[in-house]
Image: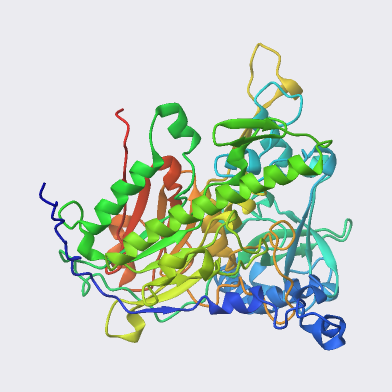
Amino acid sequence: MKAQQHQVRSPPTRAHIPFLPSWQRFHEFAAPKESSNSGGDAATTPAASQHHPYARQYSHIYAARLAALRDRCVSNAQRTLDVSSSSSENVGSAEVVEQIIEVKEGVWSVLVGTIVKEMDPKRRPLVNSSYGSCDTQSFLFPSVNGSDKEPAQESLRSYLFDSEKGDVLHLEDSSGRVEIAPMEIGDDREEHNFALDPNRVATGVVAAVIGKVSVEKGVMYVHSVHFAGPPVDALKLDRASNKQTSHEPTLLIISGLGCGADSPTDVSSGGSLALRREMLLEYLTQPKIGNGASFCRMIVAGGGVASPNQLERGNGEISNGGKTTRGNSHDDSGKSKSVNAARSSKLAESLRDLDIFFSEVLSSGIPVDYIPGWHDPTNANWPQRPIHSCLLPHSCSFVDLFGRSTNPFEGILSVGDDENANMRVLGSDGLNIADLRRFLAMSSSSKIEQNNNVTNGDSTSVEGTSSMDALHQTFRYGHMAPTGPDSLPTFPSSESDPFVMQTRPGIYFAGNCEKFETRLVDVNGDEVDEANAMAVEGEQPVTRLVCVPRFAESGEVVLVKLNTLECEVVSFCDVRA
């Protein structure tokens, strides 16, 4: 029998784009300067304790955040004051107050501080769920125990800010705090777009507010609120000069590969996640199937391995290779060790699948950057350190192509000869966006006259903020993770806040979202119509916001053309509709 001869296929010629990683600034805050595991008495010395990250107070990071964003907030507020200088209410005469304790009653003032959102804990449900691969909604808005009627709506209503139920909004700095409340503004007022909406902010957001402190109540009624936003860079993308070509360099962003296990949707539909990953691999490596030669880089935004929570079923049930063992708080140590061993074995298997997938992509010549996620074997607190090289040995052998980055991720792609044409890419695995969504909500409170009985005589329709709206809000805030450290676990820092946007990104993304969404915003953070984007770009820079869906559930990847910032989604499906 003749031996089968395997045809060796040469990899296609790739579009090469120089890349400069800049995520190292996050790593400085994620890794202690001196390890406390060196042994002996060195860990207990004063010098070692000073370098340990948890030797600092969390209050320092709020002070550093306020110091970094204060000037931007004041600048945006001054812009509104210039427009309102002719207002009948004399808003334009407001002066910037350096400290909150120095504000005068009954005088138009500009205050800058950190927003503190205090809500009545009695009507807020306990968060018992954990962020898994398929329980994002329950993590954001857990259902109320014992509620049979629209548990999601009941939970959303409990998260809605309501001053009549004891919720209070404060603005504070190092000198003190003042209670703030929205000022009644008519619909014909131009500044109503900047009106304070308590359901659009969260604790930790830095803002400048324009208003007056009431003499009777001591409450500052806010006329307008202004966030920092990202700094304006010299980056401009001229679509006229960067015309479309057949091999226009394209950035591929994917999230939620979920290696190691099929998603619940695959179990119900009979699909195979491994087959979809194979289809993606063929699309990347075979130029005849897809435009593989145009892919200059691939970014994996977290979710590379399957969630350990997929092994849990019910109350303490652990699934292992088709067998199910039930555990409780009275299990002996031997059974607990077997459960932990099963989880460790499953994680190791998931990492091997991920390593093999990456190595096949890298062997085709496509550079890959891997952002660790919530379930990856790394530290849980933000910024998350890069995954260790020993966990992905085959991928790490491609030294020049494989990048192990922090979470968040930041890098610069050179799309032209001019330095101003550099494309800065900023993003994360999406946990910061998911956590922020827990504190943002939209409501349409309208009393509906109905013949049937309605609780409290009215019906309030509440909608949770979408991932795109939350991502857009962080862009307006000028801060990637405003809920940290209050809700999102982060390292304490006394020098500076690493999540402050130091430069304006050209592409800003979040992974592990429910669906694909994209938006183009201008220098002020306002949405730009795609049809008029070319005219806007000639005057000021724009940023492409992208919500990357989980590949394990949607089978979708996102493509962003670097020359034109055009964005599209490619779907892979292995089940007939």
Could you say which quadrant of the image residue 217 lies in? bottom right
At a point 49% along the width and 43% down the height, the residue shown is: 514
Residue 15, compared with residue 486, is above or below; it is below
Residue 410, compared with residue 256, is above or below; it is below
Task: Give the image's coloring scheme.
Answer: rainbow
Q: Position of residue 77 (x, y in %)?
A: 61, 71
Q: As drawn, which residue projects farthest toward the front?
A: 1
Q: Is residue 229 left or right of residue 517?
A: right
Q: Is residue 49 left or right of residue 279?
A: right
Q: As drawn, which residue projects farthest toward the top?
A: 451
The residue nearer to you, when weighing 164 against 283, is: 283
The residue nearer to you, when weighing 366 against 28, is: 366
At a point 17% along the width and 58% down the height, the residue shown is: 287
At a point 78% along the width and 40% down the height, the residue shown is: 126
At a point 84% along the width and 35% down the height, the residue shown is: 330
* Residue 90 appears in the rendering: no
* Residue 457 appears in the rendering: yes
Q: Position of residue 25 (x, y in %)?
A: 57, 79
Residue 382, compared with residue 1, is above or below; it is below
Q: As drawn, which residue projects farthest toward the right?
A: 216
